[in-house]
């Protein structure tokens, strides 16, 4: 289904090959030799494409789909339309992701330095880098192997970037050390001074920020997200964190391993998230908080105090999810009984 | 009132000419021959300028205004100060917009290609384009006639842009097809990969996104807004949609015709908005929802389920506006009666 | 503690010198001659560095710190560990800010114009400016002395910038007049058209915006923040305002002196803030409001009507803080008593 102007599919693959790549089970009786040429959404799929079902909202689309094959949880196999070959998986989205990566592996970087890129003579580039037009790489930068620096991106003086990183178009980095396999999307701002000043009757006096931003391996940072450098310590993004678009991460914030931060979240200064914390969209955190490992926050939660590990919270101020739901239920009941004026 | 450093007014116009352009009625007895040289806000207007009243908050400013002429609803005509000539209109803001467009018609593009622009030899440009310094246009791009590509904007490989579009400074586009008369403001990010990955004990595995962003005719997209490309389908912005600054539109989202999306709204993946949906500022939508035609959402509403067409909703979780107001009233009453501790 | 790749410390200083710079009192008995080489956070400080305590959350870190010196409020002096020299100050954060500025004074601009910068021949630059690679300065711009225009920043036609300003990488300015000592962070968007159009059955008709953005002296504007120009009047940012990242300021908004606007706040069109208004993160304002001097808004407040000066408000719709807290308390009690189903 990909538009060849932008992306081309590999393949075709025999369905059995895809089952193996997906670590999924080819349903008994299904023909592993059928040729699959591409992926497709359920409602647009044809007999030579593969789709997936992972959300019960789409069961009807599943039952009507003309997809030749589909990745699905075993419990829903009996809802499949006749003639559809199934790949059964306990985690259909994970399995389908592996299928998609067969057709569309991560692009390899075509090396080359655009003539209009401005690379300081005191910067070093690893082998195989691609530097697009208008990119600016400052003095003493160290860029690893096979990095792709997008058009009009700006890498400030002294920044270190590990191997196999992608810096999106028009992004800017300063005062930061970036690990390996990090993807920074277009328009991201990393390393500028944080929002810190001493306020008095004569106005606001800026606090110089002398910390850095440390970004560990395998992190993704979404478009137009902002990550400020630390004041006297560092702002830290742990390995494998996934950060969406338009997120604000203030000075001195630390994220543990594998956190997931959905769009428009704001994390105030000096707040620390443990490992594998998940923040729904538009969540906000006050400053100086400690959020335990594995905490999950419903979208739009407003966090005002430390949170214990391993629990789900919601609401503003954020409370354990069960309590938040009770609040909503009580309020709804009150409106029914007392709101009839 | 415009600063000639930036914008120059056409005119002057006789008031009768402006009445005609505005599709408004020159009040009986008003002198259609008076010359109007510019527009102005009520409190700064002089006898040779025209202003408007469209919000009851400004009635006092209206009664004190020295504007020579004013566009106003007929019901408020009797509040006008002596000597002010009135243009009567049922929709004063619409009528005044037409007046302003007489003085300040949309600028025409002065063709020319800056020497520092980097245009791939495999890109095509229509006649009359203006390409500002540092703009980068990638291979196989097709840019229509009379487009203006702003300074340091980046148009990625294969992107198609229709006639009469404006791409703001420092914006970046990839994996997208753009219609005609589209205005993309500075710093907009279109077409990057969406926030999709399969999470497991070993971490997060990126889902390759092979869809596109389709932007129909007459769309505006505000500064620093982000629109991700679809995963296996497209992200679609319907004709005539108006999108404000710092909005997040995730992968696979579809907007119908003429939607209005105010600043800092977030729309999660695979949610579909019908035609002429209006979203107040800071509204959030969960993913995979269907929002009916003509739905209006109060600012900061948090939408967690499908919404029926033609109604107004507010609150979090969003409920019909009447119910939301009852909730607020009940809560206020409770605080009065029970909160006196 | 600063990484010399990015920032170098001045000094060392005798503690007595720092006490004087800080306008703090060297504690009786402390040795003013000890040499301090740098600042450090409490938990990482060594005997030759100075730290500070300003938040009771960090008292334990204070009592365990190995810092040679520390700025602290007199009331907490007795919690200091043995051997730590104290600088006593009523406002420890202010005093410490002055200390940090001794070690890290605001950087001076190294003059120079990058060969790849594109400066229109009709623009004027004051003495001592630094123009980084890829920056674009349009016709008729007037840039003051000692300004630093970052890489790939875009300054549009006619823009005026006062002395000693910093324009961050990839920022874009148009239709604006900027005062002195203004810091504009990377990716900021200033001066684009506001979100204004007349809607009718035939669609949305753009209202041309002929106002400007006026930014007074000593303002800071955070990364990826957007400030639209006025429609028929100006958008105004008063002297000394501090604006954080990802803030939206719509057309015709006016901020008084010294306002503090934390990240992700949205201010709708034509709303006016008085002097020294403080907005916590993610606050939203409806349009056409008047907010009094000295108003403070708790994070995430949603302001729907005019607010009286000098008070603190919270909640949505925003109410005086005491009332907002009562609401939360009443709701919590109700959940306890009625939510046991």
Image: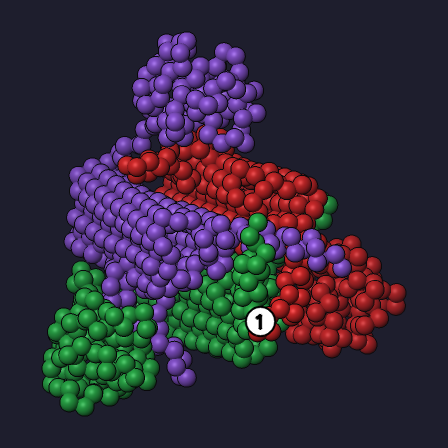
Chain colours: A purple, B red, C green
Q: Looking at the picture, does residue A320 appear above or below residue C50?
A: above
Picture layout, residue C181 above or below residue B130 = below
Q: Residue at x 31, y 75 (%)?
A: C54
Q: Which residue is drawn at 48% across and 14% down?
A: A84
Which x, y percent locates residue B91?
76, 56
User: Is residue C301 among the parts visible in the rendering?
Assistant: yes
Residue A270, position in %: x, y? Answer: 32, 63
Q: Where is residue C147 in the image (x, y as percent from the top left)?
A: 33, 69
Front position in the image: A29 or B36:
A29
> Where does the N terminus of chain C fall, quadrant-wise?
bottom left
Q: Which residue is identified by label 1?
A: C323
C151 left or right of A72 in image: left
Q: Quadrant of residue B291?
A: top right
Kind of element beneath mark 1: helix
Classify A180 as above or below C338: above
Hey, which quadrant is residue B105 in on the image?
A: bottom right
Q: In front: A288, or C161?
A: A288
Q: Is residue B127 visible?
A: no
């Amino acid at each position: 289904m990909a538009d060849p102007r932008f992306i081309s599919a590999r393949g075709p693959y025999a369905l059995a090959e895809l089952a193996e790549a997906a670590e999924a089970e080819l349903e008994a009786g299904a023909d592993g030799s059928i040729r699959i040429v591409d992926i497709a959404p359920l409602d647009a799929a044809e007999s030579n494409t593969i789709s997936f079902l992972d959300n019960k909202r789409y069961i009807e689309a599943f039952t009507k789909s003309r997809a030749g094959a589909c990745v699905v949880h075993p419990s829903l196999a009996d809802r499949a339309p006749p003639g559809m070959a199934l790949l059964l998986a306990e985690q259909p989205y994970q399995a389908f992701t592996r299928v998609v990566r067969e057709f569309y592996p991560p692009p390899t970087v075509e090396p080359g330095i655009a003539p209009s890129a401005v690379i300081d003579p005191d910067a070093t580039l690893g082998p195989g880098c691609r530097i697009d037009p208008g990119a600016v790489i400052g003095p003493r930068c160290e860029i690893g192997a096979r990095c792709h620096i997008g058009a009009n991106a700006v890498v400030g003086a002294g920044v270190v970037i590990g191997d196999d990183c992608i810096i999106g178009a028009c992004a800017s980095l300063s005062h930061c050390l970036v690990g390996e396999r990090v993807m920074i999307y277009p328009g991201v701002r990393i390393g500028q001074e944080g929002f810190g000043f001493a306020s008095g009757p004569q106005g606001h006096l800026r606090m110089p920020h002398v910390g850095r931003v440390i970004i560990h391996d395998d992190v993704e940072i979404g478009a137009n997200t902002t990550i400020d450098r630390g004041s006297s310590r560092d702002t830290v993004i742990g390995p494998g964190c996934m950060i969406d678009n338009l997120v604000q991460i203030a000075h001195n914030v630390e994220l543990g391993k594998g956190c997931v931060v959905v769009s428009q979240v704001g994390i105030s200064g000096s707040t620390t998230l443990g490992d594998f914390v998940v923040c729904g969209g538009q969540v906000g955190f006050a400053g100086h908080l400690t959020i335990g490992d594995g905490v999950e926050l419903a979208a739009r939660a407003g966090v005002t105090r430390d949170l214990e590990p391993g629990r789900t919270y919601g609401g503003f101020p954020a409370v354990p999810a069960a309590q938040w739901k009770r609040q909503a239920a009580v309020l709804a009941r009150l409106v029914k009984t007392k709101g009839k004026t």
